[in-house]
Image (cartoon, rainbow, N blue to C red):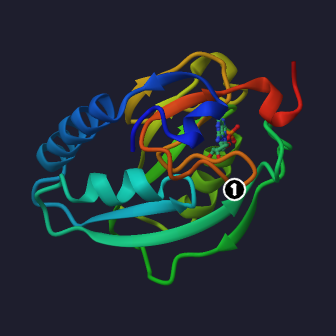
Amino acid sequence: MDTSARIYQDLDRILVTREQIAQAVKTLGQKITEDYQGRDLMMVCILKGASIFFTDLIREVDLPVSVGFMAVSSYGSGTSSTGVVRIMKDLDQNIEGKDVLIVEDIVDSGKTLNFLLQVLAQRHPASLSIATLLDKPARRVVDLTAKYFCFNIPDAFVVGYGLDYDEKYRNLPDIGVLKPAVYGGK
Ligand code: 5GP
């Protein structure tokens, strides 16, 4: 997609380019491959935001991984956390004894992943870790650290490469900051 395309008109700026994403995903895939040699790795995609990151990442992992999908709702259609997390779709397989790697789009306050870690830990995986595409450490309200992250970003609401605003902009190949006017700001 050309950056002069219509969808880019709603962006204030591009924060992470598709080239930077591809390089970071490749590097992360190699790291996961090294770290999980000889283990029974299951990678869990948190829908919908992590979907594009997930499908790119698993193809950079040179191990026979199994995959699972979960959907949680945390934000509704706004741009800040309500603190209410609900499981909309659960895993359909057992994770007991497996090395589980949760693949998430972004860690913001940390509330969503904190909740998910608690839920999944009760199912007795051999290990439970997080790989996130983006991390906004300045916004953290719970003590949570992702084992792997691709980019630390400032406190701005971003869209693209799977991340949405009101279910839109997931199809942007880059990650960008929306113009505040798009969500009713100044
Ligand atoms: P947390 O529970 O860590 O505050 O929020 C995690 C979830 O909030 C993410 O999975 C994502 O869906 C959403 N979120 C947090 N920050 C952003 C952002 O900058 N852009 C978008 N599109 N979603 C975000």
Residue 27's quadrant in the figure?
A: top left
Tell me residue 52's x, y (percent).
42, 55
Q: Which amino acid does label 1 sit on?
A: Glu
Q: Is residue 102 above or below residue 178?
A: below
Query: Quick one: label 1, few (<14), some, or many (20+) residues within 10 Å?
Result: few
Q: Is residue 124 above or below residue 25?
A: below
The quadrant of the rendered image in which ligand 1 is seen is top right
Question: In front here: 177 or 108?
Answer: 177
Q: With 114 as the anchor, is 34 left or right in this view?
A: left
Question: In front here: 74 or 183?
Answer: 183
Give the residue at x 56% y 53%. 49
- Decide if residue 136 is in sight here: yes
According to the picture, the residue beneath numbered tag 1 turns out to be 167
Give the residue at x 82% y 35%. 183
Tell me residue 60's x, y (percent).
18, 52
Q: Where, quadrant-wise, is the C terminus in this rendering?
A: top right
Tell me residue 118's x, y (percent).
62, 54
Q: With 16 as the anchor, is 73 left or right in this view?
A: right
Residue 165's quadrant in the figure?
A: top right
Q: In this view, does 181 lie above or below 173?
A: above
Q: With 109 as the anchor, is 160 left or right in this view?
A: left
Give the residue at x 60% y 47%. 169
Give the residue at x 56% y 68%. 70
